[in-house]
Image (spheres, rainbow, N blue to C red):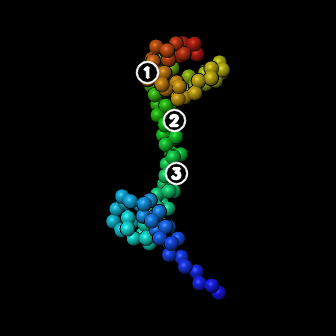
């Protein structure tokens, strides 16, 4: 069986790993056995939290819309229900922006829905 020399590939993989874990604490930044699982975990957390970021943004939009609705004498659930029935196609992101930065426009939307 022919001899396989892997020094170049091993060093390349190690260099990439060490670049990825730069800035980690303790041995996870310079010990391969600790760095590899730390990097894999970091990737898993990053994947999970990219989705959680969207979840948190939507929750914040709902809070902003609810606050603006209650200032105009309507609850969030009633407002969203009536929006759907009247086929007003504004998503929560836009409604939250209007509620926060343009309360007069949001008040007109609430009046139209009522």
Q: Give the secondary structure at mark 1.
A: helix
Indicate whether 56 appears above or below 13: above
Residue tagged by mark 3?
Answer: 48
> How far is mark 2 from mark 1, CA to CA?
17 Å
> How far is mark 2 from mark 3, CA to CA?
16 Å
Which residue occupies 58% across, 80% down? 4
75 sits left or right of 19 in the view: right
1 sits left or right of 76 in the view: right
Place of residue 43 in the rendered image (x, y in percent of width and height, measured from the top left)? 50, 56
Callout 1: 10 Å neighbours few (<14), some, many (20+)? few
In front here: 43 or 92?
43
Can residue 68 be seen here?
A: no
Residue 58 is labelled as 2
Q: Give the secondary structure at mark 3.
A: helix
Can residue 105 be seen here?
A: yes
Residue tagged by mark 1?
Answer: 101
- Does label 1 or label 3 sit earlier along the sequence? 3
Place of residue 37 in the rendered image (x, y in percent of width and height, measured from the top left)? 47, 66
Place of residue 64 in the rendered image (x, y in percent of width and height, measured from the top left)? 46, 28
In front here: 16 or 37?
16
Place of residue 18 in the rendered image (x, y in percent of width and height, measured from the top left)? 42, 64
Callout 3: 10 Å neighbours few (<14), some, many (20+)? few
Quadrant (top left/top right/bottom left/bottom right) for the C terminus? top right
> How far is mark 1 from mark 3, CA to CA?
31 Å
């Amino acid at each position: 069986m022919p001899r396989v020399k892997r020094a170049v590939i091993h060093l390349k993989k190690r260099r990439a790993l060490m670049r990825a874990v730069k800035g980690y604490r303790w041995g996870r930044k310079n010990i391969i056995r600790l760095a590899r699982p730390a990097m894999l975990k970091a990737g898993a957390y990053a994947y999970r939290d990219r989705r959680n970021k969207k979840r948190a943004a939507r929750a914040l939009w709902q809070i902003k819309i609810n606050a603006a609705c209650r200032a105009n004498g309507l609850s969030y659930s009633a407002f969203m229900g009536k929006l759907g029935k009247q086929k007003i196609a504004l998503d929560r992101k836009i409604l939250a922006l209007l509620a926060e930065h343009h309360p007069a426009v949001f008040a007109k939307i609430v009046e139209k829905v009522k």
